[in-house]
Image (cartoon, rainbow, N blue to C red):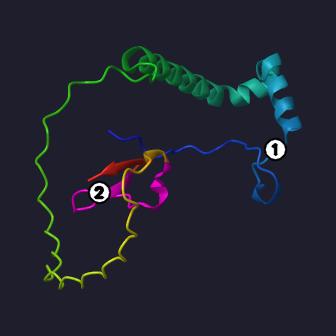
């Protein structure tokens, strides 16, 4: 059951500025009222007490009701802390699959490119043996040639294919 709308209104308020109304009081006036109440002036003055007694009785009854509600909520409902979590519920249904996206057209493969030009013939080496320490690997191709017995640069080391 939901909480009903509030029926009572403020006896006084501390609104200031543009929101101030006929029930507005300042802090000094509130302190004065509180001090008189704390001293029991509303009971000591017999004439005032006679006039206020029925209203004070009703306010006292409301105060006791509010305290009983506070006691009940704290002892029966709890202090507002979250209780233990209950067991997990059953898994829900799987949602429908989305629509498949359109696939791009598979194009035909383009024609092969033309063969590159043949490289220039190398110089003929001197007859006899070659000193391997004088080979310069920086001028050699860096991938293994298809032809056999060709020199190539394999990470700074001269290799023969």
- Secondary structure category for the residue under label 2: loop
The residue positioned 11% from the left and 50% from the top of the image is: 94
Indicate the position of residue 103 as horizontal and vertical percent values.
15, 75
Between circles 2 and 1, the one closer to the viewer is 2
Relative to 17, 70 lies left or right: left
Name above or below for residue 76 compared with residue 140.
above
Residue at (22, 62) in percent of width and height: 146
What whole-number distance in Å separates the C-alpha atoms at marks 2 and 1? 98 Å
Please rate how many residues cluster around mark 1, counting C-alpha atoms within 10 Å: few if below 14, some from 14 to 19, many from 20. some
Start and end of the magenta stretch?
134-153
Q: Position of residue 144 (x, y in %)?
A: 29, 57
Q: Position of residue 54 (x, y in %)?
A: 62, 28
Tell me what residue is drawn at x 15 percent, y 81 percent.
109
Does the magenta-highlighted stretch encompass residue 151?
yes
Quadrant occupied by the N terminus: top left
Residue 123's image quarter?
bottom left
Identify the residue at image location x=24%, y=82%.
Answer: 115
Q: Quadrant of residue 28?
A: top right
Q: Do callouts 2 and 1 mark residues in contact (Cβ within 8 Å)?
A: no
147 over 91 or under it: above or below: below
Viewer-proximal residue among 20 and 108: 108
Left/right of residue 55 with respect to residue 120 in the rendered view: right
> Which of these two is toward me, 44 or 121?
121
Compared to 84, does 136 lie above or below?
A: below
Q: Position of residue 21 (x, y in %)?
A: 76, 55
Residue 144 - label: 2
Q: Main secondary structure of the magenta part?
A: loop
Q: Nearer the viewer, residue 75 or 126?
A: 126
Q: Is residue 16 left or right of residue 136?
A: right
Q: Which comes sooner in the sequence, label 2 or label 1? A: 1
Q: Name the disc covering residue 25, or none.
A: 1
Q: Is residue 143 above or below residue 51?
A: below
């Amino acid at each position: 059951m939901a909480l009903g709308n509030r029926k009572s209104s403020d006896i006084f308020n501390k609104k200031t500025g543009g929101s101030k109304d006929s029930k507005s009081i300042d802090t000094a006036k509130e302190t004065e009222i509180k001090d008189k109440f704390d001293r029991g002036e509303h009971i000591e003055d017999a004439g005032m007490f006679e006039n206020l007694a029925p209203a004070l009785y009703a306010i006292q009854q409301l105060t006791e009701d509010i305290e009983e509600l506070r006691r009940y909520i704290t002892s029966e409902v709890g202090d507002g802390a979250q209780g233990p979590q209950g067991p997990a519920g059953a898994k829900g249904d799987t949602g429908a699959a989305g629509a498949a996206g359109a696939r791009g057209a598979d194009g035909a493969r383009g024609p092969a490119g033309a063969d590159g030009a043949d490289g220039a013939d190398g110089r003929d080496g001197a007859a006899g043996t070659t000193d391997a320490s004088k080979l310069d690997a920086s001028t050699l191709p860096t991938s293994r040639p298809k032809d056999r017995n060709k020199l190539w640069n394999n990470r700074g080391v001269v290799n023969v294919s």
